[in-house]
Amino acid sequence: MIFSLVVQASPVQSQGAETALRFARALLASGHSIHRVFFYRDGIHNGTALASPPQDEANIPAQWQALAKEHQLDLVVCIAAAVRRGVMNEHEAKRYAKDNANLAPEFELSGLGQLVEACLVSDRVITFGGRS
Amino acid sequence: MSETSILILMRSAPYGSSAARDALDAALTCSVFEAPVTLLFMDDAVYQLLKNQSPAGIGQKNLNAIQQSLPLYDIDRLCVDQSALSHRGLSEEQLSLPVESVDAAAIARLMAEHTHVMSF
Amino acid sequence: MEKLEIDGASIALDDEGYLEDLSQWQPAVAEHLAAQEGIELTDAHWEILYLLRDFYSRFEHSPAMRPLVKAVKLELGEDKGKSIYLMKLFPGSPAKLGALLAGLPKPDNCL
């Protein structure tokens, strides 16, 4: 089956982001495909390049990057949600006259349309960290 | 797969978090893609529909304003969990838009008849 | 950052041409911005721009294309409530260009 995941949970404060990551790994291990992981609301913090947890704690943003690299996952961060919260790629940082960009590699910024498109082409869309 | 139809579960109170606004943004975008979308208000989300909100005092935009534009996006089906309303002592007359009142069995049917469900 | 000078007022634009301070909008701003796009504003343009401003004041966001077409159809009739009519007035993306000229935020739901 074709799945897409919607991640609304931020990596440290909520368990939802890690659960989404585990679910993604389980899907791939079972032979399903993942059309897209869409990061929305506080879930956009999964896309920061600056996350630096202590060495004995999970680095969820880094784990997304590793998984994406291994399986060519499409990790899309909602641009409107990200820019509001200060996660930007080079292009947006320039547009808003910020000194630095901080979107991690393997993630891209795009619009909510990518969430709807994911619904249109996926058999299942699973939300993590909703109702918060 | 049958033609995509999206059910958006609204489950959060109007202003304690951005959930209501973010869910509406997702719903409006569905309409841009011409995907039929139904909104189902459950739990504290029934408060989102109350008339005469004035959240300017807490620095928020008024949800009523964006809700009033839903018909222009062809989002005409707003369902409300009847028990969530009555548990909070609310009635349909207090809501800002016409709604379809649904019981538990009807909610189960809504979830079954839409191809995709997203929760906020 | 680009700035417009109109009647002695300095009006800051973001790098896509939208007003930084929406309260600075006046008809002369629209005329100036339209001229930059090679458009001379006629009555046909103005009724759409005022409809957009009314949409924003009622619904607190700039419309995407589909609701814009529907709002025009309801307010101004079937003939004008068509994307081809709006495309002729505001080439490219009527929702985006219309919002820009009407002094509104860039529409959020344009993908």
Image (spheres, coloured by chain):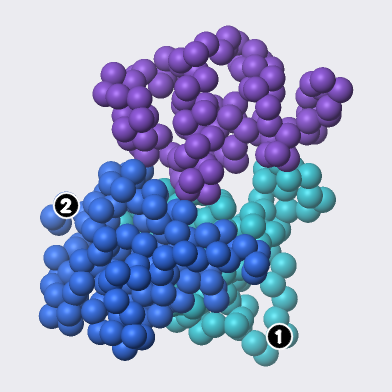
Asked whether A15 or B25 is in front, the reply is B25
- Left or right of B113? Residue C85 is right
| Residue shown at 68% from the left, 27% from the top | C26
Q: Position of residue C100 (x, y in %)?
A: 59, 30
| Residue shown at 53% from the left, 68% from the top | B18
Residue type of the residue flagged with mark 1: Gln
The picture's colour for chain A is: cyan
Around disc 1, counting alpha carbons within 10 Å, would you say few (fewer than 14), some (14 to 19), or many (20 or more)? few
Around disc 2, counting alpha carbons within 10 Å, would you say few (fewer than 14), some (14 to 19), or many (20 or more)? few
Mark 1 and mark 2: Cα distance apart in space: 47 Å
- Could you tell me if residue B27 is visible in this image? yes
Dot 2: element:
loop
What subunit carries mark 1? A
Q: Position of residue A125 (x, y in %)?
A: 31, 65
Q: Which chain is purple?
A: C
Q: Position of residue B21 (x, y in %)?
A: 48, 62
Q: Which chain is blue?
A: B
| Residue shown at 67% from the left, 90% from the top | A56
| Residue shown at 50% from the left, 66% from the top | B53
What subunit carries mark 2? B
